[in-house]
Amino acid sequence: MTPPTAGYYRLPSQVSHITEAISQIPVKSYLVGGVLRDSILGTTNPDVDIVVVASALDVAKKIADLMNGRSFQLDTSRDICRVLANVSGNEIQIDIASAQNGISSDIAKRDFTINS
């Protein structure tokens, strides 16, 4: 495999559907996790992780409504939810977590390695 070079990386097409939906919700949101790594590596991943500075449950319900999907809570104590939706015939999974103590605190807890 040829190592990636500095430059621009194309995110999977399902991300544009998600960002279109979330742009209709007045919330600060951040794309995190494996979808970023996989776009750098040139692989695909049907799972998308988003951190919001808001209630993950509220945002998940709104995204599910906008994308004709369904939402449910994964972890009530940490306010993590999942949305399952169909985009162009493919089911995608969107995990939404609340940055309960702000985005800086959330980022500090994340693993930033590509090949861990």
Image (cartoon, rainbow, N blue to C red):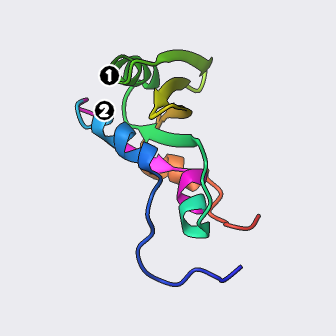
Q: Is any part of residue 101 visible from this angle? A: no
Of 112 and 17, the residue lying toward us: 17
Q: Relative to 100, is 34 above or below?
A: below
Q: Position of residue 5 (x, y in %)?
A: 53, 84
Q: Is residue 15 left or right of residue 74?
A: left
Q: Position of residue 20 (x, y in %)?
A: 28, 39
Magenta-drawn stretch contains 33: yes
Marks 1,2: beta carbons within 8 A: yes
Q: CA distance from mark 1 to mark 2?
A: 6 Å
User: Is the residue marked by circle 2 packed among few (<14), some (14-19), or many (20+) residues within 10 Å?
Assistant: some
Residue at x 38% of width, y 38% of height: 18
Of 95 and 40, the residue lying toward us: 40
Q: Relative to 27, is 14 above or below?
A: below
> On the image, numbered disc 2 is attached to which residue?
21
Q: Residue furthest right?
A: 116
Residue at x 45% of width, y 35% of height: 88
